[in-house]
Amino acid sequence: MRQNWEQTLIPPCSSDPYRISRSHASENYIVDMSHYIVALWGNVSPASVDEKYNILLTMFDEQSYPRYKDRLNELSREIKKYTTISHMMDIQAQEPISILENHLQIRIKRYRVVGSTVMPPTVGTLEIEFKIEGGRFKIIDMEEKS
């Protein structure tokens, strides 16, 4: 019985419930997790980067954790060097998220704000390999591509 459980949650912003089991989650849950990851990864400033990257780091699988801990710490130090630059990321409106088994491909636009000037966006994808383990969303690999 412990192997076949399913939890149903109704999020406050959606009428469609999340369905999460030991090794599977509903598509709307995966889409919402995609938005959450983009917010943590791409919307940072020197003042917020440590907190957001620490939260993001808790989402990584145990085997990926050491590699991403070093990477996120390095990126955080780099972002904090430039106190007048902030980073913003949006999910593209057309064909924004593709889910193929345990692989996400998220179409993104990345902006840099220098002082009060928003620089032209760069378009790319955020590729995420994930798994649902014990009902938890875990990131195995994550790469931003231009």
Image (cartoon, rainbow, N blue to C red):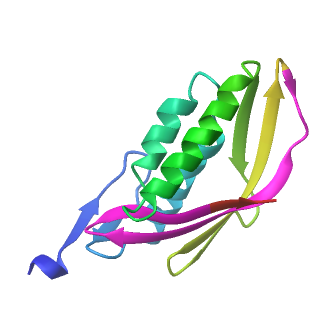
- The x, y position of residue 5, in whole percent, is 17, 75
Residue 89 shown left or right of residue 14 in the figure: right
Quadrant of the image for the C terminus?
bottom right
User: Magenta region: which residues?
Assistant: 117-142
| 141 in magenta | yes
How many numbered marks have been drawn onto this rendered protein structure?
Answer: 0
- The x, y position of residue 46, in whole percent, is 64, 24
The residue depicted at 77 percent of the width and 45 percent of the height is 110
Residue 37 shown left or right of residue 65 in the figure: right
The residue depicted at 28 percent of the width and 66 percent of the height is 135
| 65 in magenta | no
Quarter-of-image position of residue 8:
bottom left
Quadrant of the image for the N terminus?
bottom left
Name the magenta segment's main secondary structure: strand
Examine the rendering and report whether any part of residue 91 can be seen: yes
The residue depicted at 61 percent of the width and 40 percent of the height is 74
Quarter-of-image position of residue 89:
top right
Residue 85 shown left or right of residue 30 in the figure: right
Compare residues 32 and 75 and report the one nearer the observer.
75
Examine the rendering and report whether any part of residue 17 can be seen: no
- The x, y position of residue 20, in whole percent, is 31, 68
The residue depicted at 11 percent of the width and 77 percent of the height is 2
- The x, y position of residue 133, in whole percent, is 31, 70
